[in-house]
Amino acid sequence: MHITLIEDDVDLGQAVADHLVAQGHAVEWLKTASHARTAIARLSEQRDSDMALLDLGLPDGDGMELLAQVRRQPTPFPVLVLSARDQIRDRINGLASGADDYLVKPFDLEELSARVDAVARRYALKPTPLLLLAGGAQVDFHVQVVRRDELTLSLTAMEWALLRCLAIHPGQTWSKDALTRRLYSQGESSDSNTLEVLISRLRKKLGPEAISTTRQLGYRLERLPG
């Protein structure tokens, strides 16, 4: 899945993002309410997010206002609240206001994964598959191994990130802008050729038929049956 993390605590946010990426998810990390407010309409309209993890105590706004904004969107997405507000009335208020789940800080990362999976099941969301046959290669996301023609191939961190994005919905065409946003969602910079370079490298490793280009639309991962 693609998960939008809205959390201002740098240490916690990094731990959560790293954990979710290791579980095979793509993560966009926003650290302020102002950035989140700007992003929510885009996330809903362009279906750029499958789920949001929302901290309520942001430095420049209340997360409850962001939750209300998500619920006003024509295509809202599930929201799991992460908060230090641990009173029963806080949890009831969060759930009554539209949160799909409410997890009190501090929390165990494995419990977070279980909550994310439970919300995803309720919405019938599709996680990144652990094992995928793409082109002439077998991709194992669990151990981050690619095998092709009896060889084990290595991928860079950015190549894995791009492959995870494409693998969320094999066969779906992703625009260049959407893929670039997902790859560089935490403030990294890129030039206009970076995505094309990554696509080229993945095709060499997975096989030229693994990733198709749809003219003026974007790229898609071709999943083989079996």
Image (cartoon, grey):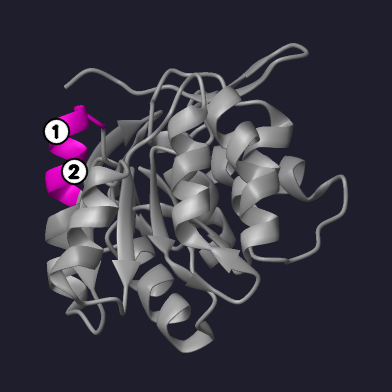
Instruction: Please report contact status of discs 2 and 1: CB closer than 8 Å, yes or no.
Output: yes
Mark 2 sits on what residue?
119
The residue depicted at 49 percent of the width and 34 percent of the height is 207
Q: Nearer the viewer, residue 159 or 201?
A: 159
Label 2: element kind: helix
- Report crowding for label 1: few under 14, some 14 to 19, many 20 or more residues within 10 A (C-alpha): few
Q: Nearer the viewer, residue 214 or 36?
A: 36
146 to 179, vertically: above or below: below
Looking at this view, name the residue that lies furthest to the top: 215
Q: The C terminus appears in which quarter of the rendering? A: top left
Q: The N terminus appears in which quarter of the rendering? A: top left
Taking the image as shown, residue 93 lies to the left or right of residue 108, namely right
Taking the image as shown, residue 59 lies to the left or right of residue 77, namely right
Taking the image as shown, residue 125 lies to the left or right of residue 114, namely right
Q: What main secondary structure does the magenta stretch of the protein show?
A: helix
Q: Position of residue 13 (x, y in %)?
A: 45, 76
Extent of the magenta region: 117-125
Taking the image as shown, residue 40 lies to the left or right of residue 191, namely left
Mark 1 sits on what residue?
122
Looking at this view, name the residue that lies furthest to the front: 89
178 to 85, vertically: above or below: above
The residue depicted at 32 percent of the width and 39 percent of the height is 78
* Quadrant in the picture for residue 103: bottom left
